[in-house]
Each structure stands twice: as C-alpha cells, then as structure tokens.
Image: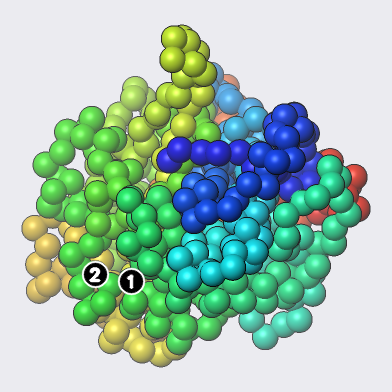
C-alpha cells in the first residue's frame, strides 16, 4: 500500500490538498515512469482514498435519530441526514470523495500514458488492464453519486461528470460534464478493454488491486445499473467459477459466529477473507463513528437481525455502546502517524468495496429480473445458508410462497426483487451500499427528527428530489462546470 504522488487533475481544483503537492514535484519527477515497476507502484494511487460511506449511509434509510443530546453531532453525519450540501474538504464528505476520485483517475491516466510510450508493452499489459479498470471504477462512482441515475431505454442526456482520459497539463483546465450516457459509454469501453488484461500474478496482494474477480464483480455491478441482465449473470458467475459461492461468502453462521468482538473488527477487512474482492485504504474517521445521534441504533439493529422472509434470525454480530448505540463490528481504525516519532496522525479505514456477497445478490437480481425464478431462488438460498444459524433447507429455504406471504406481493418477480433488496439492506448496513439501491429503484427515504419532548418531525426525500444527487464542489465552476440544481 506504499504510495507515490502524481499530479492531481484540475477537476479536484488543486485546492488545499492538491495544488501545493503538485507544485512541490519537479517536472522530471513527475514524468520518469520508464519501467514496469514504476508504473505498478504508481497504480497504488489509482484508487480513491476518500470514503463515501458516511454520507451515503447517513442519507439512506439505514439510520435513525436517536434523540437530542444522545450521541455525537458530527457535521459530516448531521448534514447528510438532513440531505444538506457539505462543501467541506475534510474527510468523509462528498467534496473529499470527488477530489479523491479525480486524484485516482490522474494516477491511472499517468500510468496509461507511460505504458503507451513504452517500446514493448507486453510486460505492462496487466497494469494497463488495472489502470483502465481503476479509471472506469472512479468515474462510475462519480457519475453514480453526482449525476442522475442511468435509466435503460431512455436518452440519459442529463449532465454526467467529466470523463478524463489524459494527464492534466495545466493547473485549472476547462471541462464539460458530458451526459450520463456518454460517461457510461466511456466506462464500458474502459471496462471491457481492461478486464481481459488483468492478471492476479502481477501483484503481491491482489486484493488491493483490480484482480480478475474484482474486475468481474465491478462489471456485474455496472451492468446491473444498465439493466443488461445477461451480462450481469455472465460477469457475476465469473467471480466464482463452478458456482461455488457458498465457499466464498462471509461465514456469518460458522467462523464469524465464533469470533469475539475484537476478532470481528480485525477480520472483516482482512485481505485473507475469501469474500473480499477489492480493498481500498481510505483516509477516514468512519471507523471511530460509534455513537452518532443520527446513525445505526436500536430500531435499525432489531430490523437487521429479525423480520425477514426466512422466518429465522440472521447470525450477524453487533456491539452495544450504551443505549441506543450499536455497531456491526465491521470497521477497525488504522492510525498513521505524521512521522515516526509523532503523537498525532491521520485515521484510515480499509473498505472492502467489492465483495462476493454483493456479487451473488446482484446475480440473483439479474435472474429475477429476466424471469429465471428458480435460479434466483437458488442464489438467495445459497446466501441464506451462510446467514442463519443451524440453517436447514427444509425449514428456512426461501420460496415464492413464503415471499408472497411475507411481502403480500403476488407477482413472483416483484416479490423476488423485494427480497433481494431487503437482504442487501441488512447485509450492507454501515457500508453505504443501500444508497445505490435507493437510487436505482427510486426508493423514497423518510427521516425523523426528534425534539426534547419526544415529538418528531418527518422529512422525506422523494423519488425525484434533486438532493438525491450530491453536490459538486463549489470550485468546479472555475473549470466551466455547472453544479447540480437545488
């Protein structure tokens, strides 16, 4: 995870963080990418070192107001709960994540330019694949969070985000947002070109890079947004050849069930976990956000563990931090000192941004959406078999009859989708991924805000509310880019 610095693309506007570091590098230092090893090292910077979880999770319906005076009221948590813009450049904000994505894109572009100049590119090909996948991933995250959601069968001509494909040569350049359609076309081009080039043998620890499984998992997620279900099934299935997903899902009802709380914190983000496909090291204090006023509390905790179509209790683990604060034991903070003898430093949270668990549920959704109900049920039961303690296919299997009875939905497709979204909502609590499904299905979100006397007001984020698009940093206007409407 050693990093080397490259120039930050102008879209991060080189403010505070970027401009100073860019100008500290001499031109010669910025261009000497003349070996495979140097390109490989540069690509460790091609992943967003910002964290989206704080603002996507807190904007979603996976949080609650625990009451005035109960818990911390951190600005990074409070503002997304109210769906208010936060133009702060500090960690765990939309602006910070925007900058982190374009920093990663700049690294990928610098690597691709260097590879393009190499007389013999053969040894570089795995790193070309990684650079293309990393560039596609960062742009995908940006267009997902800052633009309208892609809708299959429509023009998708609303503003996208600038798709940057070459290293930045000036401090502040001029850019166009393009359209959602053009951004998706560029993502697909990079994705499909880069994926066949990936080689796991190129890395000492493949899970910190776009390895083959991670590339396929990302492709499955991307094509799920496009509703290209055949491709979702193709790429998701490639994550687990032989359809052995049961062996690589998180073992909540077996190995995890034996762990202490400290062991859970340690192992959840380990590269050794079979379910983990891609890890990204993020500058973030999310791991220490244990007692927020707006967050994971008693009501949500009860919903996560109970009330599901199987009729059994999920075998997750959570920790109690005093009424009504809970944690799902997923995040361990890593503290990096500013110097070897320093007593201060920066908090980091390692995030498994792509997992086998999400990939299997994405495939189940693709099966259900294309009318392959039996295969969708098989995936749901593979998943459930690793979540329910003492799982019995006879007693706990998900069936269409159970789904219809539980949700009151007669249509099999609608019932299967409801089940999948419910499973994902519980599975990825405190991971920020629920927001993606809220966007794709235009799910309205309701937040309550309690007063001291126990009364509350209700806020709703409707399906077409412009605040579903996070706001671009104010400074993007210097590059000729319009912010999102409010």
Which residue occupies the extreme front position in the image?
119
The image shows residue 25, relative to residue 41, as above or below, that is above
Q: Where residue 291 sits in the image (x, y, percent)?
A: 44, 26
Q: Residue at x 35, y 32 (%)?
A: 332
Residue 234 sits in which quadrant? bottom left
Left or right of 261, for residue 42 = right
221 and 422: which is toward the camera: 221
Quick one: label 1 or label 2, which is nearer the N terminus? Answer: 1
Q: Where residue 272 sits in the image (x, y, percent)?
A: 24, 49
How packed mark 2 is, by other alpha carbons closer than 10 Å (few <14, some 14-19, many 20 or more), is many
168 and 335: which is toward the camera: 168
Q: Where residue 486 sits in the image (x, y, percent)?
A: 83, 50
Q: Which residue is mark 1?
A: 239
Does dot 2 land on a helix, a strand or a loop?
Answer: helix
The image shows residue 230, relative to residue 466, as above or below, that is below
Query: Does residue 116 appear anywhere in the picture?
Result: yes
403 and 92: which is toward the camera: 92
Q: Which residue is mark 2?
A: 245
Does dot 1 land on a helix, a strand or a loop?
Answer: helix
The quarter of the picture where the N terminus appears is: top left
Camera-near label (1 vs 2) is 1
Q: Residue at x 52, y 48 (%)?
A: 38
The image shows residue 109, relative to residue 479, as above or below, that is below
Q: Residue at x 70, y 41 (%)?
A: 28
Dot 1 and dot 2 residues touching (CB under 8 Å):
yes
């Amino acid at each position: 995870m050693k990093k080397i610095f490259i120039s930050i693309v102008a879209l991060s506007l080189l403010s505070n963080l970027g401009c100073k570091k860019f100008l500290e590098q001499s031109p010669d230092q910025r261009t000497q990418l003349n070996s495979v090893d140097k390109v490989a090292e540069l690509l460790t910077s091609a992943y967003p070192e910002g964290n989206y979880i704080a603002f996507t999770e807190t904007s979603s319906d996976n949080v609650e107001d625990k009451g005035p005076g109960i818990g911390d009221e951190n600005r990074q948590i409070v503002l997304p709960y109210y769906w208010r813009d936060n133009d702060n450049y500090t960690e765990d904000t939309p602006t910070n994540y925007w900058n982190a994505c374009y920093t990663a894109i700049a690294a990928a572009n610098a690597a691709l330019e260097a590879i393009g100049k190499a007389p013999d590119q053969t040894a570089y090909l795995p790193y070309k694949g990684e650079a293309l996948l990393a560039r596609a991933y960062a742009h995908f995250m940006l267009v997902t969070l800052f633009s309208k959601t892609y809708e299959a069968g429509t023009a998708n001509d609303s503003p996208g985000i600038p798709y940057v494909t070459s290293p930045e040569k000036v401090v502040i350049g001029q850019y166009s947002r393009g359209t959602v359609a053009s951004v998706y076309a560029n993502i697909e081009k990079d994705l499909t070109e880069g994926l066949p080039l990936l080689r796991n043998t190129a890395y000492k620890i493949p899970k910190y890079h776009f390895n083959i499984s991670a590339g396929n998992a990302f492709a499955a997620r991307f094509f799920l947004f496009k509703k290209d279900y055949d491709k979702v099934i193709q790429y998701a299935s490639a994550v687990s050849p032989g359809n052995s997903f049961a062996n690589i899902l998180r073992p909540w009802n077996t190995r995890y069930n034996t762990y202490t709380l400290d062991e859970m914190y340690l192992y959840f983000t380990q590269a050794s976990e079979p379910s983990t496909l891609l890890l990204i090291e993020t500058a973030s204090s999310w791991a220490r956000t244990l007692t927020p006023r707006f967050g994971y509390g008693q009501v949500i905790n009860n919903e996560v563990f109970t009330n599901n179509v199987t009729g059994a209790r999920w075998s997750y683990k959570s920790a109690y931090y005093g009424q009504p604060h809970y944690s799902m034991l997923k995040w361990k903070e890593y503290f990096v000192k500013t110097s070897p003898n320093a007593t201060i430093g920066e908090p980091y949270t390692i995030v498994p941004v792509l997992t086998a668990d999400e990939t299997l549920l994405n495939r189940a959704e693709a099966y259900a959406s294309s009318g392959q109900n039996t295969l969708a049920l098989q995936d749901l039961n593979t998943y459930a078999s690793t979540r329910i303690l003492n799982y019995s296919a006879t007693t706990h299997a998900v069936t269409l009859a159970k789904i219809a009875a539980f949700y009151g939905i007669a249509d099999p497709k609608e019932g299967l989708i409801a089940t999948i979204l419910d499973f994902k909502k519980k599975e990825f609590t405190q991971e920020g991924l629920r927001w993606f499904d809220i966007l794709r299905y235009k799910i309205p979100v309701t937040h309550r805000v309690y007063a001291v006397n126990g009364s509350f007001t209700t806020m709703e984020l409707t399906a077409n509310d412009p605040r579903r698009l996070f706001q671009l940093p104010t400074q993007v206007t210097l590059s000729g880019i319009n912010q999102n409407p409010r």
